[in-house]
Image (cartoon, rainbow, N blue to C red):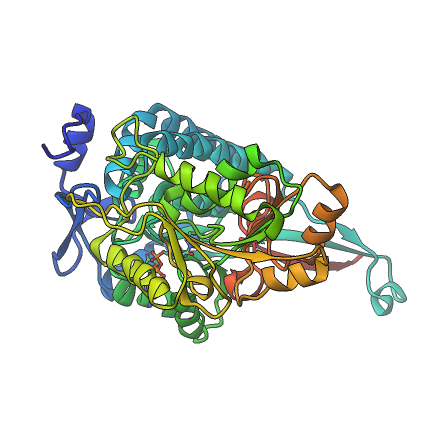
Amino acid sequence: APFDGHLIAPQTRAFLDRKHKLLIDGLWVDGETGETMETRDPATGLVLTEFAIGTAGDVDRAVAAARRAFEGPWSRLSVAERTALLTRFARLIAEHAALLTELEVIDNGMPRFIAGLCVDNCVEMVDYYAGSIMRIQGTTIAPPRHVAAEAEALTYTVKEPVGVVAQITPWNVPLAMAILKLSPALAAGCTIVIKPSEETPLSMLLLGDLLLEAGFPAGVVNIVNGLGATVGQALSEHPDVDKISFTGSTATGKRIIQAATGNLKKVTLELGGKSPVVVMPDADLALAIPGVAMATYFLQGQNCMAGTRIFVHVDIHDALVEGLVQFSQGMTLGHGLDPTSMQGPLISQVQTDKVMGFIEGAVAEGATLVAGGKRLERPGNFVEPTIFTNTTRDMRVVREEIFGPVMAIQRFEGTDLDAIAKLANDTPFGLSGSVWTQNLGWAHKLVARIRAGHVSVNCHGAVGTNIPFGGYGQSGWGREFGQESLEGYLETKAVTVRL
Ligand code: NAD
């Protein structure tokens, strides 16, 4: 059975059976070469559908359409009209929740309950940015001395959209990634060319329909699916793109920065992570065991915030490890459509081989495997939740982002907070982190010492629509979510008027 015996809704089937094209200038069109790619169900390996992929020439057409829309009808819309369009878009997402959820499950592999939460969050996020449009505002400032000396004068600032923006997204949470980039950019008044990951094109293709149905003018959002090396590279280099917002690996982020130098486009980057989880000796184990486990296993570990470096105080180490092993062994792996699945497959064969390479490497380097470690002998890309203890700072499993359900535990002694923070900060990344303790002093002092953009206490990765998110160090540039994301799509113009 195509979905391990689970049924999909007729509307999902009908969507898969469609011819999937590029969205350029308000129309679904073929790419200039007519080339297509396949997307697969990662839980079964079976092909779901084909979709058109673009070229540098298609990127040129899409950027030109976005420029025309930016200079034309879109920029003439009133704030109220732009708000109404985004609000209508939010309602359409809510109305298509079941279809979006199912597409996300079969394209990405995530369990249905997580995909459902993602759709709810997307509705909230589009509404949030719709509501923020009316609050975009400048300030009045004292005019410069030399002008004020001669005449009455006035200085104020206005916020203007950055212009045409390119957005490139990864495959790990495809729908949510698209929405968290599209909605602030639209609220700011930008026009967009978006390139979803070639592994997971489906939810963005449906969003294309919904954007048209909501009534956004032609060219405001263009979708060019395709490969990173062609479409992604062409967008990053394009001389008429004013800003690029990218989420993906640190290696690709570095390439994008280089490609963006030609016209010095603005760059926002959300990159990789290797987030620390610090468990102090007084941690509440009933909270810490599931919390630390899911800090690593959420989205099969394919999560930029994944807390894959676990530092546990020696006094609580054995009890925590025992609890984590039990939790891991109790996790049900299966097709995302199966309501009992807590963990789905990894995205691809390639990713599975990479994760298995990390596991084998850790064993070879002398880490102790205490749970999991195997690939399931069934179709699809399933890897068991895996725990290593006795890991050390130089092991690959501790240094590199794995993007799989693999936890590396290290123990520490004492409660010297500077020493503990030094362990936590021993990484070039700085995206996320968490501290588990009941001691308020320890909690806040450690939070202050951890170099990361998003740190939680007694929970992990607690992101939200209104909460800024982004990385220190090699985890990125800039922030997404909240008002800071909107700011990233706005320029500030200062105006002095000699009266
Ligand atoms: P990736 O870097 O391989 O690909 C991401 C996107 O970039 C894809 O759309 C891909 O086609 C495109 N791309 C690839 N090469 C390109 C190039 N040369 N020029 C332009 N675009 C190119 O990442 P991935 O494997 O899809 O996603 C996993 C990575 O994303 C992990 O490192 C993870 O930490 C990171 N991530 C970060 C965040 C965050 O918010 N910080 C969130 C999710 C994922």
**Along the line of sight, the residue nearer the viewer: 50 or 220:** 50
Farthest left residue in view:
1
Is residue 256 in sight in this rendering? yes
Q: Is residue 355 left or right of residue 255?
A: left
| Residue depicted at 36% across the width and 41% down the height | 175
> Residue 290, percent across and down?
49, 36
Is residue 226 in sight in this rendering? no
> Residue 277, percent across and down?
56, 51
Q: Quadrant of residue 457?
A: top right
Against 126, is 373 above or below?
Answer: below
Tell me the quadrant of ligand 1.
Answer: bottom left
| Residue depicted at 34% across the width and 27% down the height | 97
Q: Is residue 17 left or right of residue 79?
A: left
Against 102, is 372 above or below?
Answer: below
Q: Quadrant of residue 287?
A: top right
> Residue 372, percent across and down?
32, 47
> Residue 117, percent across and down?
42, 31
Number of marks: 0
| Residue depicted at 53% across the width and 68% down the height | 428
**Along the line of sight, the residue nearer the viewer: 78 or 468:** 468
Against 422, is 108 above or below?
Answer: above
**Along the line of sight, the residue nearer the viewer: 486 or 404:** 404
Q: Is residue 138 left or right of residue 101?
A: right
Q: Quadrant of the C terminus?
A: bottom right
